[in-house]
Image (tube, rainbow, N blue to C red):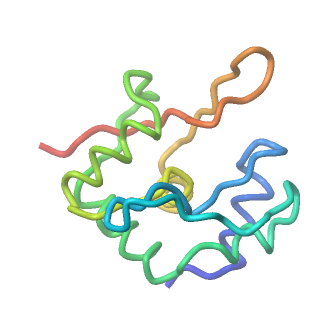
Amino acid sequence: MVQIAEIVQVLKTQVPAGTVLTNYGNEASHRSLVKPPSVTPGDYEANAAVFNLRDLDDLIVDMYIIFRKRRNVNKVMTSYGWKHVLEKKRGKYVSNGMFILAAYLSDFRVFWPKENGSYGVNPYFNMELRE
């Protein structure tokens, strides 16, 4: 099972400074916006605590089943597009932040593009669908 310390390590060393990954968004089953708790950029422990570890473990298993690594970063689709592919195959909502974190923990390379001088919120991966 994924441990909070692993999540904190990813957030501290891999995610661009000032970026907060969340496990919140528009939950399709409730048709309402779930208001996330306030997480300050740089408060890695608080950021890590918003993720359900069992859900994260399940997502990592599904990522290994649905996706495979490729040699180069795939710039055709960002995390937001890939999360929708995964949702369709799983039949279950996943937040963009949870998807990005699961990709890191699944050892996919994550490339954060710069947009107008700062990092964008939707990175690319060395990922493709399994056939």
> Please, is residue 25 above or below residue 51 in the view?
above
- Can you give x and y, in whole percent of width and height, for residue 75 in the image? 44, 22
- The answer to which quarter of the image holds residue 126 is top left
Q: Nearer the viewer, residue 131 or 21?
A: 21
Q: Nearer the viewer, residue 5 or 78?
A: 78
> Please, is residue 59 above or below residue 111 in the view?
below
Residue at position x 27%, y 44% in the image: 85
Q: Is residue 96 left or right of residue 83?
A: right
Residue at position x 63%, y 64% in the image: 35
Q: Quadrant of the C terminus?
A: top left
Q: Nearer the viewer, residue 86 or 57?
A: 86
Residue at position x 50%, y 50% in the image: 96
- The answer to which quarter of the image holds residue 4 is bottom right
Count of numbered circles in the view: 0
Q: Is residue 74 left or right of residue 2?
A: left
- Can you give x and y, in whole percent of width and height, for residue 45 in the image? 80, 74
- Can you give x and y, in whole percent of width and height, for residue 87 in the image? 28, 54
Q: Is residue 20 left or right of residue 1?
A: right
Residue at position x 56%, y 35% in the image: 123
State the residue lying farthest toward the top.
116
Q: Is residue 60 left or right of residue 3?
A: left
- Can you give x and y, in whole percent of width and height, for residue 73 in the image? 46, 29
> Please, is residue 52 above or below residue 41 in the view?
below
State the residue lying farthest toward the left.
131
